Image (cartoon, rainbow, N blue to C red):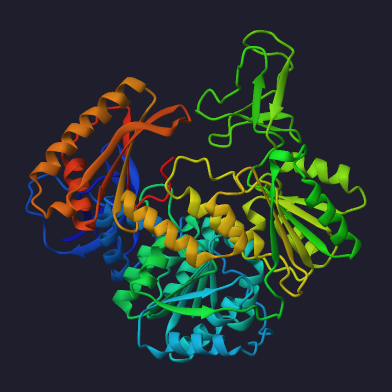
Amino acid sequence: MEYADVVFNAPMRQTYTYIIPDGITCKTGQRVTVPLGRRTVTGFVVHTGDTAPKESYVLKPISRVIDKKPVFGSSEIELAEWMSKLYLCSHGEALAVMIPGGRRDSAIPALAADEEFSEKPHNLTTHQIAAVEAICSGEKSLYYLFGVTGSGKTEVFLQAAERKIAAGRSVIYLVPEITLTHQLSDQVKNRFAGRVAVLHSAITPSQRLAEWMRIRRGEVDIVIGARSAIFAPLENPGLIIIDEEHENSYKSGSSPRYHARQIALHRSTISGAALVMGSATPSLEAWHLMKIGRIQRLELPERVSGGSMPKVEVVDMSFEESAFSRKLQQEIRSVLQKKRQVILFLNRRGFSYFFHCRTCGYEMTCNRCSVSLTYHKERNRMVCHYCGHSRQPVSVCPECGSLDIGYSGFGTEMIEAEVSKLFPQARAARLDTDAARKKDVVKNILSDFRNGDIDILLGTQMVAKGLNFPGVDLVGIILADSALHLPDFRAQERTFSLIMQVSGRSGRFSNDGKVIVQTYKPENSAVRLGASGDIELFCEQELEMRRLTKFPPYTRLSRLVFRSKDVKKVVQLSDQAGKILGDVIKEIDCAPEQAAEILGPAECPLSKISGNWRWQIIIRSSSLNILHQVTAMFMNRVKKGSGIFIEVDIDPVNLL
């Protein structure tokens, strides 16, 4: 008799054994439907054989095999097992995050053929040639392409990829947000015609599965995609590229909370592939690894198009009456007169983000989350940006009935209205997640802007990342302070990175580029050094601060979040968790400098989301092994009861 070991996309650590009925062919790596309790569920087959389990329970048969051929092989099963240990999730949860959903692969039409080859490699600068040679030399396995915005990192990545493919290896190319990389994806498709797979959230699950199976069949040389493309089942990867390595979107926000950078490191080690990361603003973790020599730094110090770095000016908004400072208005008019283009950046959607009563002080917050509702004028709704709850705006205070109410703060909708009022002749467009909900809006707006049909493009982070527009001479950062006040040790780093990245959109092909940074905190080091572009000094100062306060990269963190609809259960369990962790730490024998310490329990800065109350404990240690041991021992001992959940996040990037 044949047996199959099956795991599930659920927080269940054990493997379940089922009988393979006569007449059914079942192989390792296929998806199956099986009875589990009173339900029929989908599982992943991780092993088949003819050895019966030693336990004496009654075995049930597999109901159905979903796939004609295995969707994953032994390397994916081993990778999922490694992930389950590192991120303290189940084997099935790790496999589920790899395998794209979809119908039976036999029923899926192939994607349209890639465009014909048309894009030719560009001539490289001396620095670019040196970078490609280093990456392809095989001398080291970890490289960081550190170059100013517009220095031609993409061309280095692509020519290194061509060399690896010519040598018979394959390539994974990760980008932080695939929907904004039409340019890149077109370049890659054109250059590697017919041998490219694209994996991202904008295609249907069935299309994703079709691409996945193309990769498994060996029909693909290069895979391009966002975070989950790191799992692409390439047989012989020789190069893994992580573009804009500093971006938080490489970290998963749900279980398993993996970081694509960690998976890439593991895969490159196993396969002997080179791992190349790149950014104009490396994460402090990467900067530290370059500093101690673990990663080889490859520099691209100049813009390939010949444009010089833009002139950056900081404007103190304490003395201004409008969201547009007088200086910014003057520069916009000057640029428009020259028939050049402007990008305006503000990391807040909506019209205004704060409703309050001037009589009694009432603030309109979401009744399911502990955040203020944002007024969206276009929809005439007050909206919560965390859970999506919305309600009608009010004209009187719900608490005291006063008419003396108002909206404070400003979002992209209000800036759009101000632009049309101040510059009525200019053609303006807004690009944020609200605008991007409509089909093809992102692609059309970016295309129109590139073609010169739009004069002013305003938006959120969508306009800050990797976009290359020759006509842009001015970038205005409407408010550089939005991330500074967050209770997170990375707030300074994020503010600095954002100023540098947004500034990089200006003056790509000219020497007239300007950036206006508007702020209420002109003396803040992240704002000041971001404006001057002094990344060396900022990183040294920030690393010293992290060392003194014992935060990454000098320590590793594990975050436990307790959430429930019942606030009493949350408080009770988090207090109990603190005691269990205290006992666990005492039991572990280690050097004093490696001993774990607990921060908390405490209410999360966002104490309520989607009706769930949230408390957290941060575990900190200079040793990943000790941190892991403490977290795993705690999870084995804690009894959480019904209606309460524990989220485990190893190496969190967000503490809100």
633 left or right, relative to 565: left
Horizontal side, residue 49 vs residue 254: left or right: left
Which quadrant would the C terminus be assigned to in this image? top left
Residue 634 coordinates in the image, percent (x, y) = 19, 41
Residue sitting nearer the eye, 119 or 619:
619
Image quadrant where one finds the N terminus: bottom left
Q: Nearer the viewer, residue 645 or 481?
A: 481
When asked about the image quadrant of residue 625, the answer is bottom left
> Horizontal and vertical percent for residue 329?
82, 50
Q: Is residue 32 visible?
A: no
**Quarter assignment of residue 115:** bottom right
* Residue 117 appears in view: yes
**Spot occupied by residue 297 in the image (x, y as percentages of width and height):** 44, 77
Residue at image x 57%, y 24%? 365
Nearest the eye: 486 or 259: 486
Tell me which residue sits at (48%, 86%) in the image. Answer: 165
| 210 vs 379: above or below | below
| Residue drawn at the location 35% of the way across and 75% of the way down | 268
- Residue 296 versus residue 641 in the image, above or below: below
Instruction: Please provide percent x and percent y for residue 35.
Output: 28, 44
Q: Is residue 312 left or right of residue 37?
A: right
